[in-house]
Image (spheres, helix red, strand yellow):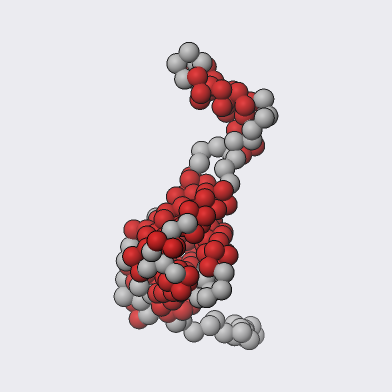
Amino acid sequence: MAKKKRTPERSSSPRPQLSKGRVLQTAVGLADEIGIAALSMRKLGQALGVEAMSLYKHVANKDDILDGIVDLVAAEIEVPTIGGDWKESMRRRANSAHEVLLHHPWATMLIVSRANVGPAMLRYVDATIGCLREAGFSFKMADHAWNVIDSHIYGFTLQKLNFPFKPEEYAEVAETFLAQIPMDDYPYLNALSQEVIDGRHDGLQDFSFGLDLILDGLEMLIDSC
């Protein structure tokens, strides 16, 4: 007697329905894992368990995905409070942005290289301008202030993400390269390297150091705005 074939059991928890939000959230996780350059519609479809063509019902193209995931990252950054202590609000905003961008290493370059007009980014920027404007800055100076702060955030973040050596390697690296910067030719660079080698300076840079310089400098300009 032939054995009866067993019918495969259906999963009691069906796969969540595909939506633009689910596509974008999955794209963020995939970009964190493999990098933005490797992100493709095919790989995104595989991560979602669907054919790549199915994605086009929810997103127009890869550019639409890039715009969407940048906005999701912007939504993670603390929005500054309008009114109150503007320096503290801007400091919290900057520290939050720095930490979020370190968590999503691909995001900084997308932010600085694309026109980002998603709702989360627009709220973030509007609140930033509002915080500075209500603190007493003119619109022109608020624009300058916001951009100089962001230049520090993005530049420091990119340097930290791409620096070729780990902090614990600084002293060893400094000693390795010391022969290439002789005292007679490069006296100050050589002396600084000796400080790192001897342990008098760890060579680490502090995000807050530059941020405080910027905020203190901006505070001096409020009365002249």
**Quarter-of-image position of residue 63:** bottom left
Q: Nearer the viewer, residue 104 or 43?
A: 104
Residue 74 lies, with reference to residue 163, above or below; the image says below
x and y percentages locating residue 189 in the rendered image: 51, 25
Extreme residue in the front direction: 223
Give the residue displayed 37% in from the left and 60% down from the top. 144
Counting the numbered discs, the total is 0
Quadrant of image for the N terminus: bottom right
Residue 36 lies, with reference to residue 134, above or below; the image says above
Give the residue displayed 67% in from the left and 30% down from the top. 200
x and y percentages locating residue 96 in the rendered image: 56, 63
Extreme residue in the top direction: 184
x and y percentages locating residue 111 in the rendered image: 39, 61
Residue 74 lies, with reference to residue 169, above or below; the image says below
Q: Nearer the viewer, residue 172 or 52?
A: 172
Q: Nearer the viewer, residue 123 or 15?
A: 123
Quadrant of image for the C terminus: bottom left
Give the residue displayed 31% in from the left and 75% down from the top. 60
x and y percentages locating residue 43 in the rendered image: 43, 64
Q: Can residue 110 be seen at all in this image of the molecule?
A: no
Give the residue displayed 57% in from the left and 52% down from the top. 208
Q: Can residue 22 be seen at all in this image of the molecule?
A: yes
